[in-house]
Amino acid sequence: MRFQVFFSGAMIVALGASALRILQRADALAFLQGGLTLGGGIIICGLFSLKSKWHGLIGAGVLALLGFARGLGNIPDFFKLADGERQRGVAPVLELGVTLICLLLLVRVLAALKQERTRRMLEELE
């Protein structure tokens, strides 16, 4: 599970860095800042999970929830891009990528928490 956290954070940072080559300068810097903030926060949660596993994973889940919720607002721009409106370039594709990474991480963290809860309940019965 920790690998998923580190990999997700690194992928978000990589998408932010790739925006420098793909987007115009002002949009690219804003996307880079967002990618470094969200991806860096997730990586920090991954580092924290090395010391305190569940606190780090829950923190990564909260950041993934925030990233996913923010990304939902960008989905209409993706459909506009699919219709042919190229006003923002390929930024909606990058935003959708971050949204999907956050969704996958959120689902994985919730599954791990549910599995741990079940394990503790079964352990308590014995």
Image: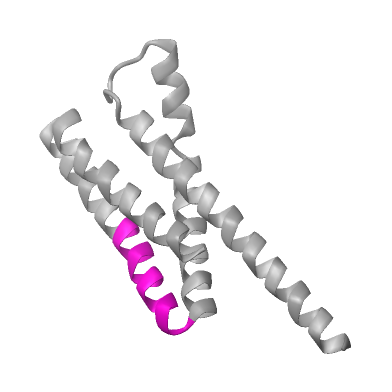
Answer left or right for 114 relative to 63: right
Residue 5 position in % (x across, y down): 44, 61
Residue 29 visible? The answer is yes
Q: What residue is drawn where x is 60% and y is 54%?
A: 107
Closest to the observer, 29 or 61? 61
Residue 6 position in % (x across, y down): 38, 60
Residue 117 image-quadrant placement: bottom right
Q: What residue is drawn where x is 22% and y is 52%?
A: 33
Q: What residue is drawn where x is 33% and y is 49%?
A: 12
- Is 47 in the magenta? yes
| Region of the chain picked out in magenta, as a range | 38-52
Answer left or right for 72 relative to 13: right
Q: Main secondary structure of the magenta part?
A: helix
Residue 10 vertical placement versus 85 (above, below) = below
Residue 43 position in % (x across, y down): 34, 64
Closest to the observer, 95 or 85? 95
